[in-house]
Image: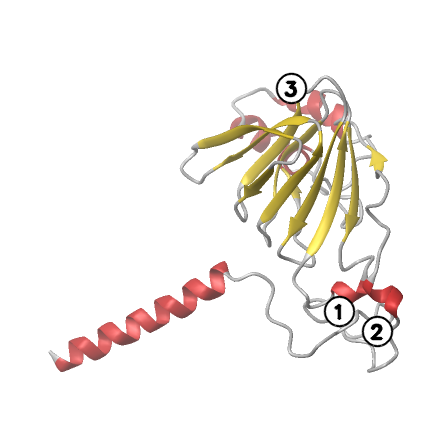
Amino acid sequence: MANYMIFFKVAITILTITYNRVFASDPDPLRDVCVADYNSSITVNGFPCKRNFTFTPEDFASMEIAQPGEPNIFGTRVAVANVFNMPGLNTQGVSMTRIDFERDGLNPPHTHPRATEIIFVKEGTLVAGFITTDNVFVNKLITKGEVFVFPRGLIHFQFNVGEGNATIIVAFNSQNPGVQVIALSMFASRPQIPEEVVARAFQTSVEEVRAIRARLVPTNVTMEHNHAIM
């Protein structure tokens, strides 16, 4: 019995540690500030820190989301303030995005593997939704002043259903939440997924896969960190 209880306590401890590791956001900082040194040759999970007192107040401020970003084929403009353009965010575990929607503009289904997302509707009326791993679709009409949260890693989207333009302000609990746009990941990867695989997965034809790729690949949509769909 004693051996059983010891085994049980060890198992619970391992499960607790594993759970915390799996569901934790960015690791806690070990110093007050660690302003990103973009010029360092050292590769770490994040960025190395600038030497003490070599940072400036500008490292902790940004105008990146003061104006709309560049337009894309989905009818949205995305502006991002993250660790890649705001060095003071390094190790702080947060970032922000602004998304401006044209009428009928769509922030297409996508995921953020490293962050929970919460949005604030600055202007307009949108449908916001996400899909659980049990394929339950959760969606709501959200309006000016409303806040909506997307759980970490789940597929989600926002769609402007109002009469005019819309704007949302987005916050993440990661300095670099990452993004995977489902359509682009499947149809516009580099190198491409074999068209037979994509056709079988979507229960369609190779010809239709080629047609979709022809519409997606030549666009100005990018999945890079500074211009990602969010």
Task: For the residues labelled 2 and 1, say whether their Cβ atoms are less than 8 Å apart.
Answer: yes
Quarter residue 28 falls in: bottom right
* Display coloring: secondary structure
Q: Which residue is mark 3?
A: 208
Residue 138 x/y as whole percent? 48, 32
* Looking at the image, residue 159 lies above or below residue 95: above
Residue 60 x/y as whole percent? 81, 64
Q: Which marked residue is nearer to the observer: mark 3 or mark 2?
A: 2
Q: Residue at x 86, y 51 (%)?
A: 63
Q: Which mark is residue 99?
A: none
For residue 40, side relative to residue 185 (left or right): right
* Looking at the image, residue 125 lies above or below residue 131: above
Q: What's the CA distance linking mark 2 and mark 1?
A: 8 Å
In the picture as drawn, the residue positioned furthest to the top comes out as 163
Q: Earlier in the sequence, mark 1 or mark 3?
A: 1
Mark 2 residue type: Ser
Residue 43 x/y as whole percent? 74, 71
* Looking at the image, residue 98 lies above or below residue 7: above
Q: Earlier in the sequence, mark 3 or mark 2?
A: 2
Q: Residue at x 55, y 42 (%)?
A: 150
Q: Residue at x 44, y 40 (%)?
A: 133
Q: Which residue is mark 1?
A: 47
Mark 2, Cα crowd under 10 Å, few <14 / some 14-19 / many 20+, is few
SS of the residue at dot 2? loop
